[in-house]
Amino acid sequence: MFWNACRATEFSLRLEECVMYAFEYTLDEQGRRVLRGLDFEETTEFELLEAARPMDRRPDGSLPQDTRWLQLFNKYEQARAAKAAA
């Protein structure tokens, strides 16, 4: 799964500010593919939020689910950074 890295820090719609980013997956205790630091349900939720293309943008360009997306992304990113530092 790839996404535009600019979404993590701001709700920018300008493509030139974005870079492609590959997510790091691992396996949970049941052998299911999950994003590092997230459980299966959180991974599923994150992927659904990431794939959504709703038309209900707010005046600032953000989406109602961006807050939850960012919470899950930050949890993932903290786990990924900890693994990289180890």
Image (cartoon, rainbow, N blue to C red):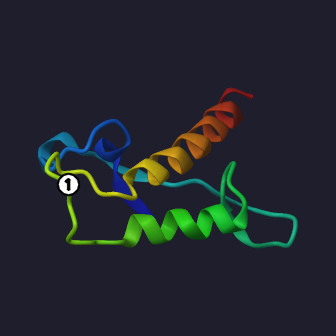
Give the residue number, with chain letter if any, for mark 1. Answer: 58
Q: Is residue 9 above or below residue 1?
A: above
Left or right: residue 68 versus residue 86 is left
Q: Position of residue 47 (x, y in %)?
A: 50, 68
Residue 56 screen position, x and y as percent: 22, 67
**Residue at x 46% of width, y 53% of height:** 69
Q: Residue furthest top?
A: 85
Question: x, y (%) of residue 84?
Answer: 65, 33
Residue at 12%, 47% in the rendered image = 14
Q: Is residue 20 above or below residue 80?
A: below
- From the viewer's perspective, is 31 left or right of 26? right
Residue at figure coordinates x 13%, y 44% from the top left: 16
Quadrant in the picture for residue 77: top right
Image vertical order of residue 30 relative to residue 11, above or below: below
Disc 1 marks a residue whose amino acid type is Arg
Question: Which residue shows up at 81% across the image and 72% down it?
Answer: 31
